[in-house]
Image (spheres, rainbow, N blue to C red):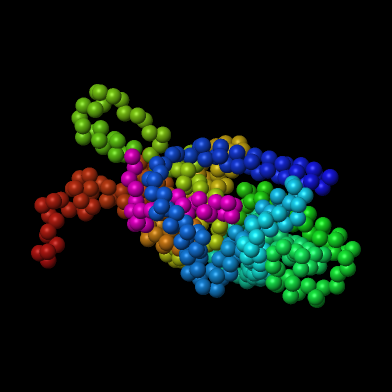
Amino acid sequence: MNQLVFTIILIAAIAVLLRSFWQIRANFALTRDVAFDGQVMKRLRLTAKVALGQTKILRKPFIGLMHALVFWGFIVITIGSLEMVIDGVSGWHRSLSIVGPLYTVIAASGDIFAYVVLAGIILFLARRLLMHIRRFEGAELTNANKTDAAIALGFIMLLMLSLIGLNMTDLYLHGSELPGAYPVSASLLPYFDLSTVNAEVMYSFYWWTHILLIFIFANYLPYSKHFHVFMSLPNVFFSNLNPLTYLPSMPEVQKEVALMLSGNAYDAAPPEQPRRFGVKDVEDITWKNYMDALTCTQCGRCTEVCPANITGKLLSPRKLFVDIRARMDEKSKNGSGHFLLGDYISKEELWACTTCNACAQECPLNISHPNLIMDMRRYLVLEEGDAPDELNAMFANIENNGAPWKYSAEDRLKWTEA
């Protein structure tokens, strides 16, 4: 009976999760395509270094190490979660123990990391709720964003508590016959007063609580900033491999220039009309921009180092991707007459960027903010003819004099005569 109930719940949880992924897939279909360069091995090495090795997270030594331990713990504990799914469907107990001595390593690592992750989550909650850390503040972080962060951390804390309770009661019931090793739980077990009857009831309670929390949390993640649990590895894999200072050109503009230089190209074949120069709304962004938005952890490391934000300007690099996700959610629901540029992101924010790339350098998941900012600027200039007066003057000088300065070519060296 338990197996039947579990299987029904498992199928329902997977169905709901697939429905969420289907909607996200539909959102990706709205975006622009971007070619994949095929550098698989280079990307795998980068993923191992940045995503699995957490190298950029560790730039902040203490809190970075805690986050890395939580991440590594999650990877190990996920193996135990898969085992519970197998057990729930089959009715077995500790089914992965068939791998032999390796199971001892897996079980011991999972038990140790359960306590490490619990300690880390308590620390993270305390920092968010009790400490006023500047990078956790900002206009883009509404009460809903902050509540979401607290809920996700609360889920993880409950998952660890239920896993610890599961290991302890299982140890009490099976003792030395229990497959694997549970060093921390075994050392703490003598301090808890359990009877066989209580342990059996509590084991069942902890088992069902833990697996149901996994299903609920997995279905909560697509609507949470903690969706990076799913997205961080693929996002780093598809990172921009060019130098941070490299700004890609626009294929649409290149085609227009090629047609102009070829002279009779328009007579041979009418040019294909581009959808739009630059980015105005979410259908103009690339699928990688949307993946960045889904991956953003809202940690604020980008905004923390942004010189424009530090000096009091409106720009917050984090806000760009919070806004993309919010606008995509809005568009997928009702379309509306809103636009990403103007209704969510203002011109003042875009022109405050110095393209110093500090945000992209610091992002622990290799999100590229300046490229997106440049594409929105390109829309303003190429489609709207809207640029700051200083840039408009420079454009006029280039058009008239062939250089950014107001002097003609004949007068360029006059400053040396002073």
Quarter-of-image position of residue 173 = bottom right
Q: Which quadrant of the rendered structure holds the N terminus?
A: top right
In this view, 54 is above or below 184: above
Q: Residue at x 66, y 44 (%)?
A: 17
Residue 257, picture quadrant: top left
Q: Position of residue 75 (x, y in %)?
A: 60, 59
Q: Can residue 321 be seen here?
A: no
**Residue 22 horizontal/vertical position (percent):** 60, 38
For the residue pair 347 and 171, the one nearer the viewer reads as: 171
Q: Is residue 248 left or right of residue 396?
A: right
Please tell me which residue is depicted at 50% across the width and 46% down the height of the picture: 290
Left or right relative to 289: residue 326: right
- Foreground residue, 300 or 163? 163
At a point 24% along the width and 28% down the height, the residue shown is 265
Residue at 21% x, 35% y is 261
Extent of the magenta region: 227-251
Task: Point out residue 238 in the picture as x, y percentages from the top left corner.
Answer: 45, 50
Instruction: Tell me if I can see residue 35 in this picture.
Output: yes
| Image quadrant where one finds the C terminus | bottom left
Residue 209 coordinates in the image, percent (x, y) = 77, 56
For the residue pair 116 and 123, the one nearer the viewer reads as 116
Q: Nearer the viewer, residue 311 or 47?
A: 47
State yes or no: residue 140 in magenta: no
Q: Is residue 14 above or below residue 367?
A: above
* Image side of residue 119 versus residue 28, left or right: right
- Total labels: the figure holds 0
